[in-house]
Image (cartoon, coloured by chain):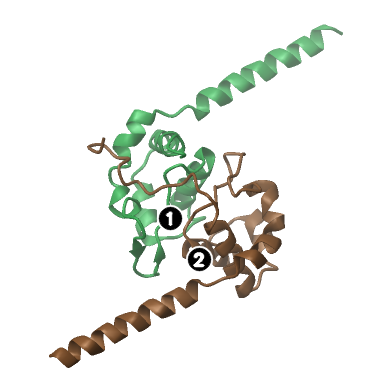
Chain colours: A green, B brown
Amino acid sequence: MTRLPLLGVAMATALFAAASVHAEGDKAAGRALVYTCAGCHGVPGYTNAYPQYPVPKIAGQNEQYIINALQGYQNGGRKHPTMDAQAQSLSATDIQNIAAYLSSLAK
Amino acid sequence: MKRAITLLSFGAILAFASSQLLAAGNAENGKQKAATCFACHGTDGNAVDPQYPRLAGQYNLYLQRVLHEYKDGQRDNPIMKGMVATLSDQDIEDVSAYFSGLPSKLDTLKNHISGSK
């Protein structure tokens, strides 16, 4: 009977470890990747055309949200001509690295 | 020529004034209406759970735009679709005015890319 809870703890630990490894992005690699993004996201108050609204502030945004957003542009859950194209060029690792870097910039 | 410039500047002022009007929402009312948002996005607009975005200090017009996108399905998100379903255009303006005016941890990418210090 004591064996079952022990097994549970071991599994939970393994799951946690796997989740932590999964979430770990390379900030330095992310910093290099966001060079492209700064063309629009690096201009304070910049408004894109068609449709016209301000390009969001993304430095300091939360990590998993950024991952979800970029995946959304990849899989069609989000639609924006420029962002769709940008996201297509990113690998899953790229996205993790970008998210790790951007989330680390919270003021 | 002088007249054309005067006219042009009038036009610019008008355009500026109307864009300000468009952005207008009532932050005080927005605070009341935003109560349901706090559970996920934080009372200060800075979500603790990293799957939810920080809203504090995000651009007002961007927040408005996105709320409309969740509402009309252009952004596909079951949770947000449910949340915005009951929001009127005025509600969206007010809630956006409230969150965009809060102290922010967000920034643009200016000075955060390779080559900048």
- Residue A85, by quadrant, is bottom left
Q: Pointer 1: residues within 10 angstroms few (<14), some, or many (20+)? A: many
Residues under labels 1 and 2: Cα distance? 11 Å
Disc number for residue A56:
1
Mark 1 belongs to which subunit? A
Horizontal side of residue A37 vs B49, given as left or right: left
**Most foreground residue, A11 or B48:** B48
Q: Secondary structure at mark 1?
A: loop
Give the vertical position of B20 relative to A10 (above or below): below
Give the x, y percent position of residue B26: 60, 69
Does the residue at mark 1 contact the one at mark 2 (Cβ under 8 Å)?
no
Disc number for residue B65:
2
**Most foreground residue, B2 or A5:** B2
- Residue B11, by quadrant, is bottom left
**Most foreground residue, B117 or B49:** B117
Mark 2 belongs to which subunit? B
Q: Pointer 2: residues within 10 angstroms few (<14), some, or many (20+)? A: some
Q: Quadrant of the N terminus of chain A?
A: top right
Give the x, y percent position of residue B70: 58, 62
Horizontal side of residue A23 vs B79, given as left or right: left
Disc number for residue B95:
none
Give the vertical position of A21 relative to B75 (above or below): above
Q: Amino acid at mark 1?
A: Pro
Residue drawn at (81%, 12%) of the image: A4
